[in-house]
Image (cartoon, rainbow, N blue to C red):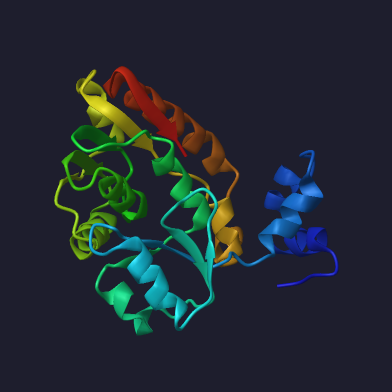
Amino acid sequence: MEAENPRDFFKQLNPAFYERYLHIDDSDAFFESLLRPIKTSIRINTLKADLDDVADRLSEDFTLEKIPWCNEGFYINTSNFGAIMEHRLGIIFPQEAASMIPANLMELRPGMKVLDLCAAPGAKTTQIAQYMENEGCVIANDPNAKRVNILISNLQKCGVLIAKVTKKDGRFFSRYEGKFDAVLVDAPCSNVGMIRKNFKYLKFWREKEIDYLSKLQKSLILVGYKALKPGGVLIYS
């Protein structure tokens, strides 16, 4: 979407949102970025197929562009994944390029014990299991029952065998001190980034949620840190 003046667009649609971000240093670039569509991207699931074989096959029908920070990640010139057999088989997983970064920073290896504190819908969880080569244990937690069902579906579709799914408030895991080699805290947020996908997220944005979410995120980070073994890796995203 293009607008002659992005500031006017956001001011009209949600004045409180506009005022919240008006005075940040890069406000013009920020508002403009929210009007640019996200490039469609996928991650090839090496739990089910060979990376090069899948990339070669997809290149016959689509244009692929390598994502620099993820060896298995590609931008692709389609969003019609329902028509792609590899998607239906769990061989490729639609995933935003930026969301592929956290798992790449977790120093994952087979045999680890990993806690994914806010796991649904499962893009990062399946990526974690992929990097662990389906060896070890991933506790995939989410407090929302509906989202847990989606998480389970995606884990099954991608052939993840090492995930134990739980439906708990993330703060429940404070009792498991020093148990995990790595923890991912992909915390609940205000969904500002989702505005690029659908402007309904702008319409329903409320400033009063920011204080609550920031406190919740802090508590989840502290839980994740407490759950780490000495020398473990905590990623907050």
For the point 29% across and 57% down, which residue is it? 147
State whether residue 187 appears in this view.
Answer: no
Compared across the picture, whether 158 is left or right of 37 comes to left
**Eyeballing the image, is 93 above or below 101?**
below
Q: Find residue 128 and report its horizontal and vertical position in percent.
A: 31, 45
Q: In the orientation shown, which residue stands out farthest toward the right?
A: 4
Relative vertical location of residue 172 with respect to residue 148 in this rendering, above or below: above
Q: Quadrant of residue 171?
A: top left
Number of marks in picture: 0
Q: Residue 230, position in %: x, y?
A: 30, 15
Q: Position of residue 146 (x, y in %)?
A: 26, 59
Relative to residue 69, is residue 34 drawn left or right? Answer: right
Query: Which residue: 48% across, 76% down?
Result: 79
Q: Position of residue 104 (x, y in %)?
A: 42, 42
Residue sitting nearer the eye, 16 or 170:
170
Looking at the picture, does residue 74 appear above or below residue 56? above
Rendering quarter of residue 187: top left
Quick one: 232 or 19, which is closer to the camera?
A: 232
View extreme (top): residue? 230
Quarter of the rendering occupied by the N terminus: bottom right
Measuring 36% from the left and 80% from the top, which residue is drawn there? 84
Kindly indicate the quadrant of the structure image that contains residue 233.
Answer: top left
Is any part of residue 12 visible from this angle? Answer: yes
Name which residue lies at 46% across and 76% down.
Answer: 59
